Image (cartoon, grey):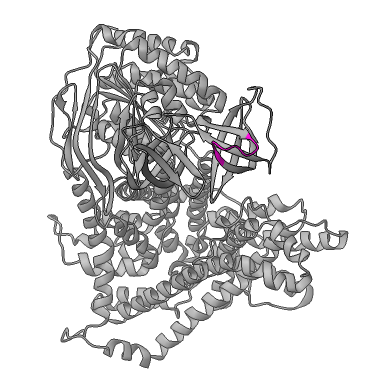
Amino acid sequence: MRASANREPAGVEIAGVNLSYGATHVLKDVDLTIEPGEFFAFLGPSGCGKTTLLRLIAGFAQAQTGTVRIAGEDVSALPPWRRDVGMVFQSYALWPHMTVARNVAFGLEERRLPRSEIGPRVAAALDLVGLGDLADRRPSQLSGGQQQRVALARTIVVEPKLLLLDEPLSNLDAKMRVQVRRELRDLQQRLGLTTIFVTHDQEEANTICDRIAVMNDGAIQQVGAPMDLYENPANLFVAGFLGAANILEGEVTLEDGHPVFRSGATIRIPLAADEPARHRARLMIRPQHCELAAGAAAAGAAGRIAHREFLGAAMRYGVAVGQSEILVERPFDSGQGLLEVGAPVSLAAQPGRARVFPG
Amino acid sequence: MSAVAAPLAPARRPATPLGEWLLAAGVLAFLALFLVAPVAIVVVVAFLDPRSGAPTLVNFADFARNELFLRSLWNSLWVSAMTVVLASLFALPLAAITARFHFRGAALIRTLGVVPLIMPPFAGAVAMQLLFGRNGSINLLLGDWFDVNIPFMEGLNGVILLQAIHYFPFILLNVSASLANIDRSMEESAQNLGASGLRLFRRIVFPLAMPGYVAGASLVFIKVFDDLATPLLLNVKEMLAPQAYLRITSIGLADPMGYVISVILIAVSVGSMWIAALATRGRDYATVQRGGGGLARREMRPRDKLLAYAVVLLILALTLAPHVGLILLSLATVWSFAPLPDGYTLAHYGRVFAETPQYVWNTLLYATLAGVLAVAVGSAIAWLVQRTRIPGRAGLDYLAMGALAAPGVVIGIGYLRTFYGVTLPTGQPLATFWFMIVIALAVRRLPYALRACTAGLQQVSPQLEEAAENLGATRPRTVRRILLPLMAGGMLAGFVTAFATASVELSATMMLVQNASDAPLAYGLYVYMQSPAGRGPGAALGMIAVAIVGLCAFLSHRLFETGQGPEMR
């Protein structure tokens, strides 16, 4: 089954979308372009509008302004059943009164396909997700992972222009989640289907998506490839949402022509040469980009180990420096030895790793 | 894969589809025409001067000056209150025994909770006279053995006994549900903090069980206060509902007293419901705690066990008495001044089917149509409330539930007054057309059907419908292929409940039946029971009613037990 054999992948353009439920402004000036064949994620905390944006594309939500184009066609006024986009619901939404095969056949029946064609296509779709032998079961007789695959088969069997996945992994246990997300990625690659994936889990988005739109409070914060977002977050929200981050408040001053970030009496971090001076600034640095040395040293900021957490591959230290606490991660087997709680340490930033945002 | 999906043409989409508006308008029109207007007209007429048509309170003054009416009002209040007392005497020991002790007879008590409900109280009225009346079996035996005669069935006593036997399950079920919701940890934490015995009961168990008791008791009070058929069959006329019926049927539609009595019936209904709502408001304790499972159960000492069985068996005997009496009466050749009938025959059943088969067929027809109508309107309201954003949709729900506060007598009088002037093409007044009985039954059963449909729809996640729309099914197709099959169980349960209760309704029916050929079974039973020679066939009709309702109770029990429609496993 290759959807791409007879259909070019479709792109999505969202322009100027505003959506409110009563006084609640759920989507604010959303502009977004999703390339054909892309595996794209809407990532954000709950209530950020990511599911509403997905439902807007599927036709289950109505925007007050703006347009949604799929494969160049304006679908804003089309009801859900005419949009030809496949959606996998968070709850899977399998119909309990139908067998697995009847569930999968539903979309083809609604498209008035001849019976002779429906059977083989249903079988092929079920084989594709590895459930060929469960066609006559009821959804209630399946495990969570199997239900999820039925929902997927039911959606891709109609060869939609677009595949929408609403938190498809959230009802699976941790082990299944890793396995299924890999399978999703494989399937998407094989079908060449433009796919949008909604999640609040940055690890899920990072591991399977080509690009991510990070959303917060109804607005898109940044769009980019996972590594790009991690390395060059556009703002503090993106920095904090993708991975652990230390955020420090302070100012950027020029010392002998070189910009330096200062926070409190002890923290002093040299910055890249093109950083402008700011009276108020916030600095972001990831825990693994901080260096720790036992004892007081002249070069770094003096602190004290406040607590430590063993993470397996790494040891995470909370270091009290003046009024702030800074997280530092060191590989567990780095050979540097462990630091005890209460031990005096000195702290430094790896050069070029810190990011500065206006305060 | 070969074929591409069918080409999809663009279409405009309005915010709220026209179909939803039309459905809401249809439902509103139905409720306005057949519930609001008749009741409103009854209330308005009660406040109008019958000669001049001017607004006045003179009708109420007339009512207050009439000794018969005041006695009827007092009798109705007395009978309702004493029924609550007697029903509580039956129900509370049973509830306490099952909640508090390990008791083998618990299953028996649960059965007790259903048995009386499958027979309308009026059906057993005459049979109870023959068992408990002055010359009934029990008093004949008592007279022989002890030379005493207990006036179980004299005047109002008979109504109280019959109603209490019929309605005590409402209190039993509500109190049992409340007790079952009390977690044993609540009692134990009170004991842990030093409470025990009476203080424990007064401060923990009683307040937690109280809302259930008040809800059950007020329901019993309303039902008895509004009931027309039971007093009439026992030939007790000095109560409010019978007085309203007699005024309208003997003096005429223009007589204001029927309307004044209707207003009083409505006021008492609304007042009792209001008290019940106050008692239960903010006391939905079931949601506060997890689990439930009831109080700690204790073992009974042998002496207590004996006493418990004696109480349970006595109440069981009383509960079954109308059924036993009705069976005997339906099979008796002659039964008079004797503990048991002189001989047995099936002739009464034969006479019913030979002479008046229309009673049975009319009942099946009316109850079926009323059930279908109630479920159709009920599911439409449930759907509008849960699946659309039409403004004021919740009001439809409240309006439909308002039928609970409209006594059958009031609905009957309202229909007569509202639709008598409307004539069919045949020249017959609309109010006397048989289909109006169906509509009246449907309106009265609508609250039950609505709740069942609402529960059925709530089980269907909206995502199941969205998934269908997403795969190309239009809204009508989604309703047909997804929604209807999934809520069929709830709709069927609603239908069965509506059908069963509609098939033995008599209050509104009594007002609306104009000739015997249009009458349903319950009315036929009333007609037969008017003469001693008709008692046998009347009882046979009653047994047929018991069979119909019993079968429905069994079916709905099965439906609710599995909780789902036939297609679900």
The x, y position of residue A200, in whole percent, is 43, 35
Furthest residue toward bottom: B65
Residue found at x 24% / y 66%: B37
Q: In this view, does B569 lie to the left or right of B355?
A: right
Nearer the observer, B217 or B551: B217
* Residue A37 in the figure: left or right of residue B208: left
Q: Which of A223 and B542 is in front in this view?
A: A223
User: Residue A15: horizontal and vertical position, in percent?
Assistant: 18, 34
**Quarter holding the N terminus of chain B?**
top left
Q: Is the magenta stretch mostly helix, strand or loop?
A: loop
How many callouts does the rendering have? 0
Which residues make up the magenta segment? A294-301
Q: In the image shown, does B306 or A237 lie closer to the viewer?
A: A237
Residue B55 shows in this picture: yes
In the rendered image, residue B104 lying in the magenta stretch gets the answer no
Q: In this view, does B505 lie above or below A150?
A: below
| Residue B356 sits above or below residue B526 on the image | above
| Residue B258, percent from left and from top | 32, 78
Question: Which residue appears farthest toward the right when viewing the image?
Answer: B302
Q: Which residue sits furthest front?
A: A256
Position of residue B361 relative to residue B109, above or below, is: above
Residue A160 image point, x, y percent: 27, 19
The residue nearer to you, when weighing A338 against B317, is A338
Residue at 18 percent of width and 48 percent of height:
B22
Q: Is residue B137 visible?
A: no
